[in-house]
Amino acid sequence: MAWISPDEFLDREAIAETKHEYFAGIVHPRGAPWVDGDGADTIHGVLLGNLVAALRSAGAKRGWCVYGGDYRFQDVYPDVVVVLDAPVFIAEVVTWGTAGADLGEKARNYRASPTVRQCAYVAVDRARVEIHTRDEGALQG
């Protein structure tokens, strides 16, 4: 894959029929790593749907806008984003195929954002949720 600039990525993404993510100059199809045929894609979808539904219910009277996979944040599409005036909460449903990106480059970008107060990482292969909360300027796990 050839390197492209962030501006070129945004131009291509604006007219693309499917969503892509951008990491260090390389464009990746959104979701491709976890469509693996072992059921992780189904579990991912169920967990994502349940998380979005719970957050929408909890935030209905609080003014939360909850997005499930369709909100672009820093050239990627987190699985869940809660927006007040800006993104304040991000969640990723982590499979074996997405763990490298979800817990690596994407997590570093989320931690670098001054508006994101919390990030949650939900595992599909075991009962585990890891939550990182901003404490005095930095997200702590």
Image: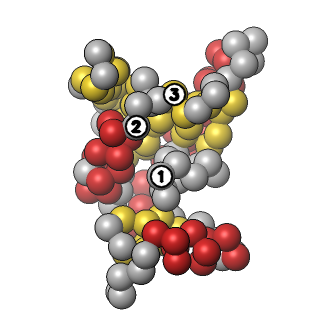
Q: Which residue is mark 3?
A: 88
Mark 1 packing: few (<14 Cα in 10 Å), some, or many (20+)? some
Q: From the image, tell me which residue sits under label 1.
A: 74
Label 2 crowding class (10 Å Cα cut-off): few <14, some 14-19, many 20+?
some
Q: Is residue 36 above or below residue 74?
A: below
SS at mark 3 in the image: strand
Q: Position of residue 5 (x, y in %)?
A: 43, 75
Find the residue positioned furthest to the top: 61
**Element carrying mark 1:** loop
The answer to whether 7 is drawn above or below residue 51 in the figure is below
Question: Which x, y percent locates residue 84?
Answer: 63, 25
Q: Quadrant of the C terminus?
A: top left
**CB atoms of marks 3 and 1 within 8 Å:** no
Q: Give the amino acid type for the residue marked by disc 3 in the picture.
A: Val
Which residue does the numbered mark 2 point to in the structure image? 113
Q: Residue furthest right?
A: 61
**Nearest to N terminus: mark 2 or mark 3:** 3
Q: Nearer the viewer, residue 63 or 80?
A: 63
Residue 141 located left or right of residue 52? left
Instruction: Kindly check if marks 2 and 1 are in contact, taking CB atoms under 8 A apart as contact.
Output: yes
In three-dimensional space, the C-alpha distance between marks 2 and 1, rounded to whole angstroms, equals: 9 Å
- Quadrant of image for the N terminus: bottom left
Q: Quadrant of residue 98?
A: bottom left
- The numbered mark, 3 or 1, whose residue comes first in the sequence reads 1
Tell me: 133 left or right of 83. Answer: left
Q: Amino acid at mark 1?
A: Gln
Q: CA distance from mark 2 to mark 3?
A: 9 Å
Q: Is residue 16 visible?
A: yes
The residue sitting at 52% across, 53% down in the picture is 77
